[in-house]
């Protein structure tokens, strides 16, 4: 079997930690790309030197040159401006659209069959932009949304019930960020419905904390945003593709009529395998869930319209 190769774009906290997790797990060799000369090279060399201690032989290099990404199976785009306190995801749109457009063009130039996982915020819109610019089939471009949000929801449920996170299943739909739609009805603890274990008020509080999960960390860090959990989520998605796991995960995926939505990237459960998004998994929603989901979709749709108005300027 040929050696798997992953490009991680952006050597900030999310990108460098994603690269570290991939090589430590022996999933693939990594090329870490950043526009700032020396940053990716230094972090890659530091990670590589932990190999003898941790016992991995996978390779990692840092570079500013996309030529070295040629032949990549997957790219994970993490580059972009970080969200600052008081900044909405929409505030990030213009600056990060320009960054993602440039990155995408370079990636497909050297790896025309690549699969791209987008992490850069606002992720629903940046994934849409990446798909448009890349010209790749829509199943080969998807974004990190519900994997991270579901992990946060599971964490808060486990903390509340004082149990292992491994006993918690939880589910989040919709756009990533303020309009996400956690689904307590489809969340379980050791096979028991969450709604049987906690009061409605308590569940509502956990849902709110999940929805505000990124902002809570930003407010605590003051000068940065989350990266440990986002990088773990990105690696879970990449691993599902590289190892052809056929694993169902909630991602920002292109909808072509599923859930009654067409032409948008929205957070839904999908089956990930060697070909990227191999199936969009449709689940029945209650009236209230459908309403919340439709609201989330409308926010994404409005963002796409805003994005199209910007495209001529970037």
Image (spheres, rainbow, N blue to C red):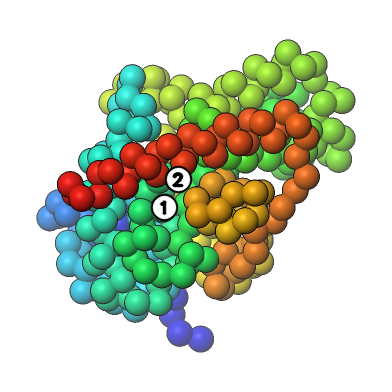
In the rendered image, residue 3, in percent from the top left (x then y), is placed at 43, 80
In the rendered image, residue 263, in percent from the top left (x then y), is placed at 50, 54
Q: Residue at x 37, y 73 (%)?
A: 72
Residue identified by numbered label 2: 124
Residue 146 vs 221, above or below: the answer is below
Instruction: Give me the disc on residue 127.
Output: 1
Taking the image as shown, residue 30 lies to the left or right of residue 2, namely left
Q: Nearer the viewer, residue 261 or 134?
A: 261
Alpha carbon of mark 2 to alpha carbon of mark 1: how far?
5 Å
In the rendered image, residue 223, in percent from the top left (x then y), is placed at 28, 26
Taking the image as shown, residue 278 lies to the left or right of residue 308, namely right
Label 2–label 1 contact, CB within 8 A: yes
Q: Mark 1 falls on what kind of element? A: helix
Q: Residue at x 65, y 64 (%)?
A: 279
Q: Residue at x 20, y 63 (%)?
A: 63
Instruction: Give me the disc on residue 113.
Output: none
In the rendered image, residue 255, in percent from the top left (x then y), is placed at 57, 55
Q: Nearer the viewer, residue 299 or 76?
A: 299
Residue 104 vs 4, above or below: the answer is above
């Amino acid at each position: 079997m040929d050696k798997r190769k992953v490009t991680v774009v952006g050597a900030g906290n999310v990108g460098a930690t994603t690269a570290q997790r991939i090589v430590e797990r022996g999933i693939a060799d990594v090329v870490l790309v950043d526009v700032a000369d020396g940053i990716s090279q230094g972090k890659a060399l530091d990670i590589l030197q932990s190999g003898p201690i941790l016992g991995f032989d996978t390779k990692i290099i840092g570079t500013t040159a996309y030529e070295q990404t040629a032949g990549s199976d997957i790219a994970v785009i993490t580059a972009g401006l970080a969200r600052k306190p008081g900044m909405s995801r929409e505030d990030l749109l213009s600056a990060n659209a320009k960054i993602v457009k440039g990155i995408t063009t370079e990636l497909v130039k050297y790896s025309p069959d690549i699969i791209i996982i987008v992490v850069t915020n606002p992720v629903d819109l940046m994934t849409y932009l990446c798909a448009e610019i890349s010209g790749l089939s829509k199943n080969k471009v998807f974004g990190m949304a519900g994997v991270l949000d579901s992990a946060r929801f599971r964490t808060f449920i486990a903390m509340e019930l004082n149990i292992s996170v491994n006993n918690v299943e939880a589910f989040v739909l919709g756009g990533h960020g303020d309009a996400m739609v956690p689904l307590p009805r489809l969340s379980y603890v050791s096979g028991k419905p969450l709604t049987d274990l906690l009061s409605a008020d308590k569940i509502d509080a956990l849902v709110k904390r999940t929805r505000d999960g990124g902002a809570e960390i930003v407010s605590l860090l003051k000068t940065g945003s989350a990266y440990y959990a986002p990088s773990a989520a990105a690696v879970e998605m990449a691993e599902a593709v590289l190892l052809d796991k056929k694993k169902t995960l909630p991602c920002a995926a292109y909808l072509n009529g599923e859930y009654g939505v067409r032409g948008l990237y929205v957070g839904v459960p999908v089956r990930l395998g060697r070909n990227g998004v191999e199936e969009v998994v449709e689940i029945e929603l209650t009236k209230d869930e459908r309403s919340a989901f439709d609201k989330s979709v409308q926010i994404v749709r409005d963002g796409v319209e805003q994005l199209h108005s910007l495209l001529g300027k970037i």
